[in-house]
Amino acid sequence: MKHKDKGEILDVAIVGAGVSGVYSGWRMLRDGTARTPPRIGVFEGSDRVGGRLLSLTPPGMPDTRCEFGGMRYMSRHVLVNWLVEEFHMATEPMPVGDPANIAYLRGEQFRLSDLNTASTLPYRFRGAEKHVVNDAANSLLLFALQQIVPTCLGLSHDALLIEVRTAKFQGTPLHQLGFWNVLARVLSPDGYAFVRDTGGYDCLVSNWSAADAIPFILADFGANVTYSRFPHGYDEMPQRLAQEFVAAGGQLHLNTWLRSFDAGALPDGTQGVLLKFADGATVAARKLVLAMPRRSLEMLEPTGAVLDPAHVGVRALIESVKPIPLFKIFLCYDYAWWEAVGVKAGRSITDLPIRQCYYWDTEPKTATSPGGAALLASYDDDLSVSFWEGLRKKTAHTELWESQRPQATAPASSQDWSWHQAPVAMVEEAHRQLMEMHGLSSAPAPFAAAYRDWTEDPYGGGVNFWQIHARSWEVMQAIVHPRDDVPVYICGEAYSQEQGWVEGALQTAEIMLQKHFGLTPPPPMVPPLSAAEQAHRVLRSKRAKTAKAS
């Protein structure tokens, strides 16, 4: 970034061009209530917009977008749905649980439809667990949740969020208990293992705040949940937001790493925030928005009116969540060999380190494209990520999996597939585990492979979960403005009640924008008018027309 004019003052500096950052800038310029548009700059340390949304095109498959970060949304995500409509974005259903898909557990292959026959499964269930597993209309996890919060299945999502604030389990407030700790009291060891193995995620049943885990699981992974995805890539959404932001007069600076900031006097003598960047540039702003997760905040110099260690309250807010490791590797094949064993779409699960695989997209061969089939070969989190750490270390001698199809020899940016090439050892191991779980002795080697480990800086993890003892409903309101006397604000998915979802990033941005920037709620957050209110509005309109005519 070029050094800013020493006399220039931004009204708002936003650091982080992930969803919450570019959305905040877009909303501020779109608001239109100010006489003159505010001067807003978005500063991003990397070379791209999107944060943990990263959609890449494999070589030879021009119509496929492999999602290395967030990949789907739900119908109840009102803000995401609003942006989909606002930008006329193409979407399509995303299947997950086909009964014919595979569950490879403890060395035995099953179909998902077999998971309701307890006697055939390699788990030693106890007591009522067998009957629950045999009931196709129930699940062992839902059974466990009812033992913890008996009313949980009968409450709406919003009502449950309020209920868990005061709920207790065996006399202890739920937010003071770890979810794993509580599950251990209501499930047998093998019952817990079955829930973890068949759920596909280690982190969901790990030790995070039980008060937040229960509504999260019921809302996001319940029986009636449906998902949608973006055929042109999920990162199209932040890119569109950024384009609209710039078109409205906003400034966007990539490859611009913030080093530190502090409250101080601005060039015009008023008080604001002074930002210092890694390239030596300085920026003055009346307000600063840090659209960043915990790890990114911790990488800033711990100095100044907000991040100095003396401000223990701010530090406690930042540390109220913990980053969760998340890893994805995509393998692309000449054809969908998995269809030979009866699977075509959705996901299969296993307790092997690959944990989940999604049968992604298949492109036919054409005159201009060789076609192929993409497979999200491993989507894993938490403990399973550590398995791949030993295979991902890149050194000068690490052999990378070379694509068998033309691609850029020198990737121009992190938006290029070849920027994320996987090591040969990682690809061979993922391919081996896929063969084992699908019951095949061999299949053609992939023609392309790429991966993303979100534990790497500056993200620290692919998602953030609330810590045990955190009163999340209070923290998410407080952290958006951690010090009342300093114009610095924090937003992003990490400190939301929709952690891991784009909706969470938008949710915290809206709390900040409405509470501290005076913006009115967007259309999806405005409650619908009652019949009486609608009638009153019609009557008032008629009276106004009558008065005008007279």
Image (cartoon, grey):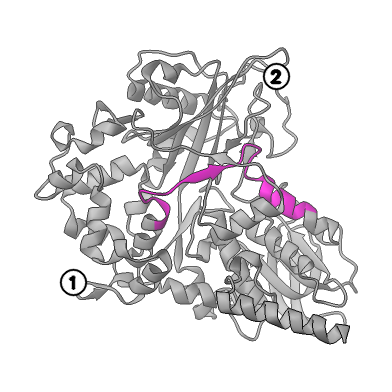
Q: Is residue 67 left or right of residue 164?
A: right
Q: Is residue 518 above or below residue 152?
A: below
Q: Is residue 292 above or below residue 228?
A: below
Tell me the element at label 1: loop
Q: Decide which of 231, 41 is in the foreground and name it.
A: 231
Residue 264 in view here: no
Q: Is residue 266 left or right of residue 146?
A: right
Q: Position of residue 344 (x, y in %)?
A: 45, 25
Q: Is residue 236 magenta?
A: yes
Tell me where the magenta segment starts and ends, as one range. 219-243
* Residue denoted by label 2: 406
Q: Split into 4 quadrants, where in the image is the N terminus?
A: bottom right
* Residue denoted by label 1: 170
Q: Position of residue 352 (x, y in %)?
A: 33, 33
Q: Decide which of 353, 31 is in the foreground and name it.
A: 31
Query: Which of pointers 1 and 2 lies earlier in the amino acid sequence?
Result: 1
Tell me the element at label 2: loop
Q: Residues within 10 Å of mark 2 (few under 14, many from 20)?
A: few
Q: Is residue 199 left or right of residue 511?
A: left
Q: Decide which of 148, 283 is in the foreground and name it.
A: 148
- Residue at 44 percent across and 36 percent down: it is 388
Q: Amino acid at mark 2?
A: Pro
Q: Amino acid at mark 1?
A: Gln
Q: Split into 4 quadrants, where in the image is the C terminus?
A: bottom right
Cα–Cα span, label 1 and label 2 = 61 Å
Q: Residues within 10 Å of mark 1 (few under 14, many from 20)?
A: few
- The image quadrant that residue 214 belongs to is bottom left
Q: Position of residue 222 (x, y in %)?
A: 37, 51
Q: Decide which of 536, 411 is in the foreground and name it.
A: 536
- Residue at 32 percent across and 19 percent down: it is 439
Q: Position of residue 310 (x, y in %)?
A: 54, 80
